[in-house]
Amino acid sequence: MSIKVNRRALKRLGSALEARISTVPKSQRKLRRFEVRARNGQDAYRSPAELLVAAALANRTRWDRIVKPRLKRFRSRHRGVQSIAELRALVDSMGDRSLYRRVLYFGSGENPRNYRGPLLRGLARAFDEYGKKLRGQGGKLLTDYQILRAWAREPDPRLVLEEANGGKVLGLGPKLVDWLRMYGGDVPTVPADVYTVKGMKELGLGDAGKTAEFVARLFGISPHALDLAFRAEAGDGRTR
């Protein structure tokens, strides 16, 4: 039994995708390497340290209204904190209340359900320890950008961070791992978040994450452009 491609179905899907992708400006359809974007100030986060702060803030939070202004405040208040090691030193020097008020800019750090402080501490520690391990292998001089790229290509990136942290990183789930891999590690993927789930369902495809990557490649579309198209439909910020 031979498998035949349903060309009518593909054509319908292609038309639907073309309509979605047209909402993303051509200049934004390909994601340049994080190091280049950081150097050119293209993102709301402009260093590896700010990337991890953004990761701690991003989940279930409006990007343009909440995350971007808080990153700007962080940059203004902590000008010397750009590397992962510098971020770790900063968060380790603070208690929870100071961390929430002076880094994440929440009014109170006393809500036990607010996982963002432990998430930021865990990410800073895990990536710093992972970087030390890589640098110790043959005395390699690696930048944070190279470390993020190496981590993003590990067979199980989440497990690697948990091992480096000495235990689970509170708040680190598959969606955030994909987000960090794409925006920090330069791996083309489509995070399996609410935007992707909604967008894929509207295209007639219920399964989100890996299916979204397949669809993007089937039609020669950048996974980053597809991710931005799903976000644009929901009215969220386009630039990460």
Image: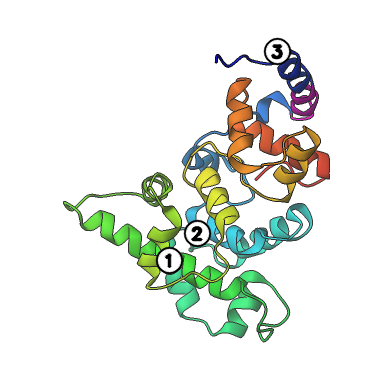
Query: Which of the two labelled residues, at mark 1 and mark 3, occupies the earlier sequence position?
Result: 3
- Hey, what amino acid is under mark 1? Glu
Query: Which of the two labelled residues, at mark 3 and mark 2, occupies the earlier sequence position?
Result: 3
Element assignment for label 3: helix
Q: Nearer the viewer, residue 92 or 176?
A: 176
Horizontal and vertical percent position of residue 130: 34, 60
Whether the residues at callouts 1 and 2 have beta carbons within 8 Å, the answer is yes
- Image disc number at residue 74: none
- Image disc number at residue 86: 1
Element assignment for label 1: helix
Please check the rendered image and state whether residue 79 is part of the magenta-colored stretch, yes or no. no
**Residue 21 falls in image quadrant:** top right
Horizontal and vertical percent position of residue 207: 67, 42
Query: Image point 69% across, 24% down: which residue?
Result: 26
Q: Mark 1 and mark 2: span between their CA atoms? A: 8 Å
Label 3 sits on residue: 7
Q: How many marks?
A: 3
> Magenta stretch mostly in which secondary structure?
helix
Horizontal and vertical percent position of residue 154: 37, 48
In the displayed structure image, the side of residue 111 where residue 82 appears, left or right? left
Q: Nearer the viewer, residue 187 or 158?
A: 158
Q: Nearer the viewer, residue 117 or 189?
A: 189
- Hey, what amino acid is under mark 2? Ala
Query: Which of the two labelled residues, at mark 1 and mark 2, occupies the earlier sequence position?
Result: 2
Q: Quadrant of the C terminus?
A: top right
The stretch of residues the image draws in magenta is 16-24
Q: Mark 1 and mark 3: span between their CA atoms? A: 54 Å
Direction left: furthest residue: 138
